[in-house]
Image (cartoon, rainbow, N blue to C red):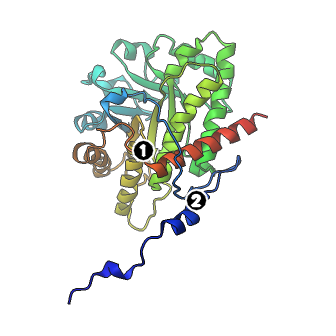
Amino acid sequence: MPVTRWNSFSAFDPKKWRTAVGDSISPSSASWERPIWSPEDASFEFPSRSIADPSEGNPWQLQESIHSSDQVLDSLLNGVAGLRLDASDCDMTWFDGVHMNMVELHVEPKLFHANKLDVRVLLEAGWRGSCGLDVTSAVGSAQMHDHWRMLDEAPHLRIWRFGSSDHRLRGLNLMEALVEHCLLLDHWLKWAKASDAVIEDELNRMVWRWWTSVDVMEEVAGLRALRALWSRWLAANQLDDQAVWIDAVTSDVTFRDELETDHLIDLTVASYAAIIGGADGLETVPHIKSKSELPPDENALRWARNIQHLMREEAGLHRTFDPMGGSRTVDRWSSNLLEAAWSAYLESKL
């Protein structure tokens, strides 16, 4: 005689459930708590993104770090739309055959300081993308002024970058990393007010960099809170609200050396979190950590790109603006993280 196994479970008791989850813990000003699900709504409005209007869904730019001239065309032919350039031997010959109007170049400022690349030549060729100076507490007014002057003829480029390294490697949790972004914005704003820069114009030239890891819901909440935090900082400083470009990079802090192909699982999950969280650009790093000055393995680069291609072409994650919008759990988590970070930021200014 067939057995209906679910009959062995006791009936659901709504009153007992509400008693168990009705009193969620509010985050303190110094940290934040992972909230349990509660029947109370926590409204969270996801701001517009920089890459496209909400009506266009959830597009993102597939990015890759370029380590050799041979890698440039190979990456472009395999769907990369944003080339990250950091290699010390990079020069103008790397872009032979590249149509600049079809790609964005994200160039490290040191390549111009070392005379490896020429700003004017790149601009005349149609350069789009970024040349982000990492704004840290150690960056002084003179350095910011020189960087601004170097690129003052390129108002379309993103030249101010916040989030110089993976916050996990510096012992920061999500809330502390959010607070750090706001404090660095204050540092930048002090320079901007003392300079000849038009602040409203420079706000369009920002890049916030973020590292995503394998805790999907936490990372999605962090990215959503990050974008909302930018809007709140603008309002607090009486500046017009506008979208900010967020570049995500998959974190390798969870990598283990036992079996490197297992890292592909970490990278897939971290990439998924970045996309669902609404990053404008994403670099999925190779699953093999580089142990030398040699370029990454070609297969590792191909697999990293294909993770994003599958999410776009097969899973269709580009179709819906703010895919997690309306999830009561994620909205509540995003809201709690935003409020905790803003409170901690305000306290740090006292």
Instruction: State the residue in front, 51 or 110.
Output: 51
Q: Residue at x 59, y 19 (%)?
A: 239
Residue corresponding to mark 1:
326
Q: From what the image shows, is residue 214 above or below residue 278?
A: below
Q: Residue at x 24, y 24 (%)?
A: 97
Residue 195, horizontal then vertical, whole percent: 66, 12
Residue 22 - label: 2
- Inspect the image, locate mark 1, and give the three-letter code of the amino acid beneath it: Gly
Q: Residue at x 31, y 81 (%)?
A: 5
Residue 288, horizontal then vertical, whole percent: 39, 55
- Inspect the image, locate mark 2, and give the three-letter code of the amino acid beneath it: Gly
- Secondary structure type for disc 1: loop
Q: Is residue 251 visible?
A: no
Question: Spatial distance from mark 2 to mark 1, Cα to Cα?
Answer: 20 Å
Residue 69, horizontal then vertical, whole percent: 32, 34
Q: Earlier in the sequence, mark 2 or mark 1?
A: 2
Residue 323 lies left or right of residue 177; in this view the side is: left
Q: Nearer the viewer, mark 2 or mark 1?
A: 2
**Mark 2 burial class by Cα count in 10 Å: few <14, some 14-19, many 20+:** some
Instruction: State the residue in front, 118 or 103.
Output: 103
